[in-house]
Amino acid sequence: MLQVAVVGSGPSGVYAAQGLVQQEQVPGVRVDVLDRLPCPYGLVRYGVAPDHKKIKSLQGTLRTVLEHERVRFLGGVRVGPDGLPAARLRELYHAVVYCVGAATDRHLGVPGEDLPGSWSATDFVSWYSAHPDTVPDGFATGGFVAGARAAVVIGVGNVAVDVTRILARGAAELSPTDIPQAALAALAGSRVREIRMVGRRGPSQARFTTKELRELGGLPDTGVVVDPAELALDPAYADPSALPGVQRRNVEVLRGWAERPQAAGSRRIRLRFFLRPVELLPDAGGDRVGAVRFERTLPDGRGGVTGTGRYEDIEAQLVLRSVGYRGVPLEGLPFDADRGTVPHLAGRVLRDGSVASGEYVAGWIKRGPTGVIGTNRPCAKETVASLLADAPALARREVPPDPLAALRAQGLHPVDWSGWQAIERAEAELGASLGRGVVKLPDWQSLMRAARGQGTA
């Protein structure tokens, strides 16, 4: 019987587990899905915005896989430093599939980026998604929006749209979601009224999808402002017919907003293009960010942009950078620092150019932070195909009959599926006590207490 460990319980990890237990080529495969967090679903739980209920409903599909009779969820298991060494994990299973994503964000690399009030969009998403690694005082003090009147979001992808939309949401719209109570209270009391989402290139090169973009135009009490002169700097703006479908529809939506009268509302979302951040400026007191200095850019005719030497300072007490994710090295695995991925051949890990027996990757750590959630399915399928082709040789190696017993012997105490169900019950109880639906538990202590059946008090 082939025993496989999948490290990571997000979409790529669960799709890999699904492929392994539903195929008929190698019968009886058993899969342990390990995650360093006590909760499954990865970015579907901790990356999808709380008001995107349709996307979050994907948890139901992932749940079906994790409840399969030959799949076992083992949460709270850290692989690497301060946890289970990768070499030891490899001894316990015939094969290990690493689906650990891209765990950090890219930086702007400009002066002032580390000023208080300047954050990555990843930090902000983790805060409103109740990721247990979030800085605790972000929950206790009003978090990111405390004292802010104007916000700048740097980037024009879907994550940038998400954080812009959440900043503009009111309490009445967020209360029915699973957003943690402290984040809800902070956003309800937010004084942010001006939100600018800024891209260094033009509208035809923006990375957001049209569905996400249109949502900005439907927010209550919020007007969307687009400068037609700025849009016209894009050569494709006048005639977008030759653009791919998504980019063409994006331009059409932006044109519609630019041509209509400004909508009324107490909040404004301003979409800006052809501006490159060059410096974050401190406020008058010098103790936090007060503005962002941008350089006007223009198309260079080769798909990029060039600076013009003209600058504009935009007020902001909150700056969120959303310029991409990046994979980080995992102890015991090779790593391509330039690409931020693990070197592989069709999902087989490569060590010094040679295939490493029994080691595989899928998801962002394999291909980089590209695509949407569904892109992980064919990615995982390719990796599973490689693993199954290798199965006869892998199965010849002896491994412990029950890896869980060996993990416990290492001093680990994984959160099993019943522990996760206890967390779900605790979150439902918390929501009921607040007059809301399910409300996420925001920290490690409350999650682990719930997993052990000790409630939320």
Image (spheres, rainbow, N blue to C red):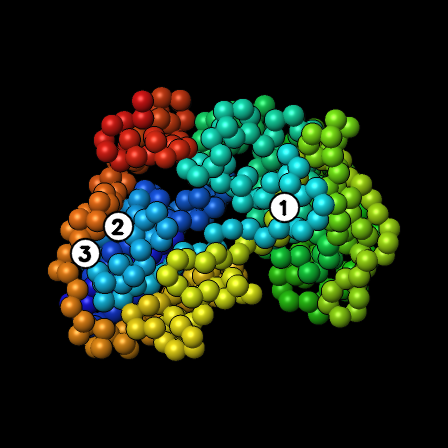
Instruction: Answer above or below: position of 44 versus 303.
Output: above
Q: Secondary structure at mark 2?
A: strand
Numbered badge on residue 321? 1
> What percent of the width, then of the height, locates residue 268?
71, 35
The reply, left or right, for residue 294 in relation to residue 90 is right
Mark 2–mark 3 Cα distance, whole angstroms, equals 13 Å
Numbered badge on residue 73? 2
Mark 1–mark 3 Cα distance, whole angstroms, equals 42 Å
Who's the residue at 40% across and 22% down the image? Answer: 435
Of the residues shown, which amino acid type is indicated by label 2?
A: Phe
Q: Secondary structure at mark 3?
A: helix
**Is residue 22 visible in the rendered structure shown here?**
no
Who's the residue at 64% across and 34% down the image? Answer: 116
- Furthest-left residue in view? 401
Quadrant in the picture for the N terminus: bottom left
Q: Nearer the viewer, mark 1 or mark 3?
A: 3
Mark 1–mark 2 Cα distance, whole angstroms, equals 34 Å
> What percent of the width, then of the height, locates residue 40?
34, 47
- Residue closest to the eye, 413 or 268: 413
Who's the residue at 23% across and 73% down the image? Answer: 394
To which residue does mark 3 refer?
403
